[in-house]
Image (tube, rainbow, N blue to C red):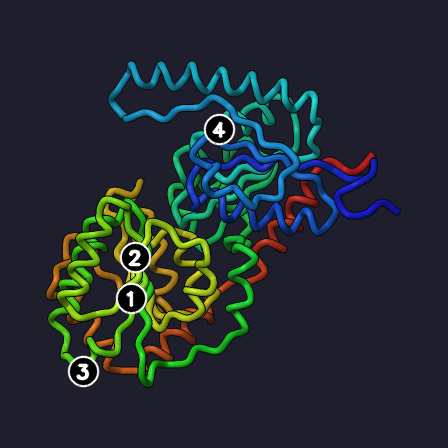
Amino acid sequence: MSAPGQGPASRLAVLAAGGTGGHLFPAQALAETLAARGWRIVLATDERGAQYADRFPAEQRIALSAATFRRGDPVGMARAGVQVARGTLQARRAFKALDPAVVVGFGGYPALPAMLAAIWSGRPTVLHEQNSVLGRVNRLIAPRVSAVACAFPTLLMASPQVKARAAVVGNPIRPEILPLYARPYEAPTGEIRILITGGSQAARLLSELPPAAMQLLPESLRGRIKVQQQTRAESIEAARKAYAEAMVEAEIAPFFRDMAARLGAAHLVIGRAGASTCCETAVAGRPSILVPLKIAADDHQTSNARLLTDAGAAVVIPEDDLTVDSLAEALRTLLSDPRRLADMAAAARSVAVPDAAERLADLVERTARPSA
């Protein structure tokens, strides 16, 4: 018998994902699961995806031409159309050589050429939507793929036909996050550890407001707080200065690669409401303050956050309501009530789907072309 991932019986899956962590992390989790089952993996993404794909278990990466555009920009639409057409031809040539048993799309414009090529060549296809709102690219192809999977119980902006056949599998979580599901939450009794995520899209709000808000907290709380914060490089020095003025210990960096350890150690998470943030916070069983990105397409982050707020696991502050005072009040209320933090942590874990990668892998295998 051949070893996993080797030999003539091994089937190949192409995973196509846009170049953001929100698309790549679930794709990586599925890739890890399929590879453990003996599949060979090829990744199709763009240059942006390289920063998130350093540990992606793919034997090959293919870069396909693609482009996005702004609505109301006919020139941009035409250019994007040319790029997508070129990428689709590239994908068809690649698929002819690779002969994948299935092509799995995770959304984003870089995934579109691969999915179109697979659909037009009659190959089995699976589409996974990470957000509670069906993305614009995914809306184009959802009616034409072999199977549709989604992360949230709701799938807004999808046609009744797509909703009816969508399988709710959850959002595949990075393997290093999964062990946190079994780790109990310990409410703070001394040191209070706060993890702030968000990256460049949250740079101004979630770089400038938290340290200013913490200056308004009682000294008895401030002296116990330790912050770990992601922010874009150009905002780091200003954030460090603000935390120093607030007399709050802080570690600040553009990106944390050991997110599992930091998430597992956190007593409270502050961040956006992207699909990965919501689902990983749920699996880790951590209370959170969420600030949905106002400009997110179709306001999907507000919809994502409902998974946690409906369960009582998170406090949501809309961008328009986020001020130094409102954030300080939310922090004061939560950090002064360890029992509530523990209840929120339990609520978060209650809506988690830790086996989402396995569920999606099952669907992929049912949809894929059988072994020869």
* SS category of the residue bearing label 1: strand
> Quarter-wise, where is residue 223 in the image?
bottom left
Label 3 close to label 1 by CB (< 8 Å): no
Query: Where is mark 4, residue-wise?
Result: 112
| Mark 1 burial class by Cα count in 10 Å: few <14, some 14-19, many 20+ | many
Earlier sequence position, callout 3 versus callout 4: 4
Q: Earlier in the sequence, mark 2 or mark 1?
A: 1
- Tell me if mark 3 has few (under 14), some (14-19) or many (20+) residues whose alpha carbon lies within 10 angstroms of its own: few
Between 53 and 332, the residue placed more toward the observer is 53
Residue, disc 3: 220
Identify residue for label 1.
Answer: 227
Task: Check if mark 2's residue and mark 1's residue have beta carbons within 8 Å.
Answer: yes
Q: Residue at x 62, y 39 (%)?
A: 58
Q: Is residue 331 left or right of residue 37?
A: left
Task: Check whether the beta carbons of the residues at disc 2 and disc 4 lie within 8 A of each other.
Answer: no
Q: Residue at x 54, y 63 (%)?
A: 178
Residue with the mark numbered 2 = 252
| Residue lying at 32% horizontally and 53% vertically, measured from the top left | 253
Residue type beneath disc 1: Val
- Measured as percent of width and height from the top left, residue 132 is found at 40, 50
Check disc 4 and give the amino acid type.
Leu
